[in-house]
Image (tube, helix red, strand yellow):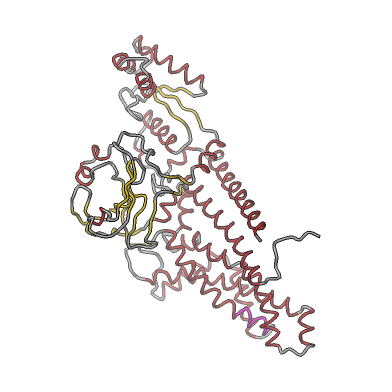
């Protein structure tokens, strides 16, 4: 079994990499990169050269290319002592057209162009109405160089950056003494409550370890999963955070900020991450925080996307097994009787009718009965879950009934069953000790997949009932061309699929010891 698991895990890892790589090839090679601005309101507000500049800055942010501005080039020369500040200032005064440039500007723009073109970059200059506009880091937008990142490089960066380990050298700015501090009294609770915490300075996260009253009670930020940054669905937020962060209305509670300010707030100080210059740029941060660890998540009253999907999926799965197993057994034992015929009609209906059709049918019937037909995060009613659960459970019931009946009937016609009858065993003993046990083996294999698939959500069902779950996340990302979310969710689905197959094999071997995944030398 050990060798089998290792082999399975290696094959699974390769499969995951191949699947994600294929998705990345399709969306980054076959899809025009301008599509990522489909839901970007800022893109429509700017025009002409400003739009070009905005596009390049965002493409760099999302990993499409490397971008270097002329101002950054001059700053590098000054930092290395190759030019003084007076020369840097004179060389940065680019005119509206090359013909209007001063001699010193022409000298350094030519050096900039020659150097970056020799490195494989494309150098562009935007003239006319662009004088004085900023690009990034104080750079003039008229002159910049860019080079696309090869797809293989993007894949390598993505897979090697899936897990990041925080340390005291992650923040590049000068923030004073770097280090980790262990305390038994977390400052978030006023310092008078026993609550162990590890606080960092120079790390991305301020709190690397802390304790609170929410599951799983012990939390860490030493290792962070990075599935990819969202472009539009949850702009600037990692896909993993998007799937696991709470949703709905803000939950206000008394908070004491590091400056001593007391306020009813939804800010979760334990999630604070470093944001350079945030206190200088925002007076609100200056009133609340003593350092630039100001970027915090907020506490909200509803479950996360994965939480909604899992609750609906696990209840539907449990309901399906509770109903399908006894009904499938009854159909097999009463083959060609009334109960078998009624069950067959139900199975044929579910198989023949498109899922979207009967989901809308259940939605219409449920609406007539007064059940909520869509989710409202501000509503505390549990009735919102009824229709999505029913819509998910009914096809699963039909599928389980169909396969259990088929497996049991196959076993009923086996030679060992005839031999058991001739040996004097009753029909009840034959069914319980032989037929059901053997027929249940392939059904058992699907249990881990059914449970883990609850985490991924149901795309169509969540879309119809407007469930704020993980399944609807993928369709929303596709509609908005949010490539970061598409890749991240694909990886999430692929990992769960591989894990469910391995767990299914283990469970099947546990139920039937005759099944072995090891080979013996002859």
Q: Nearer the viewer, residue 198 or 426?
A: 198
Residue 93, placed above or below residue 19: above
State the quadrant of the N terminus: bottom right
Give the prevailing secondary structure in the magenta stretch.
helix
Q: Position of residue 413 (x, y in %)?
A: 76, 79
- Which range is magenta? 327-334
Is residue 253 toward the left or the right of residue 235 in the image?
left
Q: Where on the picture, by quarter, is residue 369?
A: bottom left
Q: How many marks?
A: 0
State whether residue 438 appears in this view.
yes
Give residue 82's position: percent from left, percent from top.
37, 15
Front-most of 376 and 215?
A: 215
Find residue 411 and report its horizontal and vertical position in percent.
73, 77
Using the image as rendered, state which of residue 293 and residue 190 is in the foreground: 190
Outermost residue toward the top in this view: 103
Residue at 39%, 47% (x, y): give it: 237
For residue 392, above or below residue 261: below
Q: Residue at x 47, y 46 (%)?
A: 163
Question: On the picture, is 365 further left or further right than 287?
Answer: right
The residue drawn where x is 64% and y is 55% is 8
Please state, as top left, top right, bottom left or bottom right, where the C terminus lies in the image. Answer: bottom right
Would residue 21 be counted in the magenta stretch? Answer: no
Spot occupied by residue 290 in the image (x, y as percentages of width and height): 23, 43
Task: Determine whether, in the image, residue 102 is placed left or right of residue 389.
Answer: left
The quadrant in which residue 55 appears is top left
Q: Does the magenta-highlighted stretch encompass residue 332?
A: yes
Residue depicted at x 52% and y 70%: 317
Which residue occupies the extreme right position in the image?
A: 522
Q: In this orientation, which residue lies closer to the viewer: 410 or 288?
A: 288
Q: Is residue 272 visible?
A: no
């Amino acid at each position: 079994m050990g060798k089998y698991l290792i082999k399975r895990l290696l094959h699974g890892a390769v499969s995951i990499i191949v699947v994600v790589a294929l998705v990345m090839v399709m969306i980054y090679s076959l899809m025009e990169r301008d599509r990522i601005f489909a839901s970007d309101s800022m893109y429509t507000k700017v025009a002409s050269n400003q739009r070009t500049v905005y596009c390049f800055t965002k493409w760099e942010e999302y990993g499409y290319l490397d971008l270097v501005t002329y101002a950054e080039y001059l700053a590098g020369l000054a930092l290395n002592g190759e030019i003084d500040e007076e020369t840097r200032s004179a060389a940065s005064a680019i005119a509206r057209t090359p013909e209007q440039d001063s001699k010193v500007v022409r000298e350094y723009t030519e050096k900039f162009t020659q150097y970056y073109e020799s490195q494989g970059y494309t150098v562009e200059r935007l003239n006319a109405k662009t004088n004085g506009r900023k690009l990034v880091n104080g750079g003039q937008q008229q002159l910049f160089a860019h080079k696309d990142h090869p797809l293989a490089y993007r894949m390598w960066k993505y897979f090697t950056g899936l897990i990041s380990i925080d340390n005291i050298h992650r923040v590049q700015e000068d923030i004073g003494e770097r280090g980790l501090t262990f305390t038994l009294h977390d400052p978030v609770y006023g310092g008078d409550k026993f609550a162990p915490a590890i606080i960092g300075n120079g790390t991305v996260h301020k709190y690397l370890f802390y304790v609170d009253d929410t599951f799983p009670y012990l939390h860490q930020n030493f290792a962070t999963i990075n599935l990819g940054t969202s472009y539009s669905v949850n702009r600037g937020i990692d896909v993993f955070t998007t799937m696991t962060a709470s949703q709905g209305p803000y939950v206000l509670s008394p908070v004491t900020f590091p400056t001593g300010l007391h306020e009813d707030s939804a800010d979760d100080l334990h999630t604070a991450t470093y944001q350079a210059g945030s206190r200088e740029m925002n007076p609100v941060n200056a009133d609340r925080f003593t350092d630039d660890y100001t970027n915090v998540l907020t506490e909200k009253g509803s479950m996360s996307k994965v939480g909604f999907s899992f609750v609906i999926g696990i209840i539907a799965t449990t309901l399906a097994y509770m109903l399908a197993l006894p009904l499938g057994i009854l159909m097999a034992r009463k083959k060609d009787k009334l109960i078998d015929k009624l069950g067959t009609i139900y199975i044929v209906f579910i198989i023949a009718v498109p899922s979207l059709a009967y989901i809308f049918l259940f939605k219409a019937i449920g609406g007539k009965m007064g059940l909520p037909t869509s989710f409202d995060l501000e509503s505390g009613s549990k009735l919102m879950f009824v229709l999505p659960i029913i819509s998910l459970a009914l096809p699963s019931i039909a599928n389980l009934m169909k396969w259990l009946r088929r497996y049991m009937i196959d076993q009923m016609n086996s030679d060992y069953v005839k031999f058991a009858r001739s040996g004097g065993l009753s029909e009840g003993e034959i069914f319980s000790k032989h037929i059901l046990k053997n027929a249940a083996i392939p059904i058992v294999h699907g249990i881990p997949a059914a449970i883990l698939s609850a985490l991924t959500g149901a795309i169509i069902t969540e879309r119809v009932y407007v469930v704020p779950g993980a399944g609807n996340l993928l369709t929303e990302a596709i509609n908005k061309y949010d490539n970061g979310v598409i890749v991240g969710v694909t990886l999430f689905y692929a990992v769960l699929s591989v894990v469910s197959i391995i767990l299914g094999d283990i469970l099947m071997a546990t139920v039937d010891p005759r099944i072995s995944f090891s080979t013996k030398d002859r």
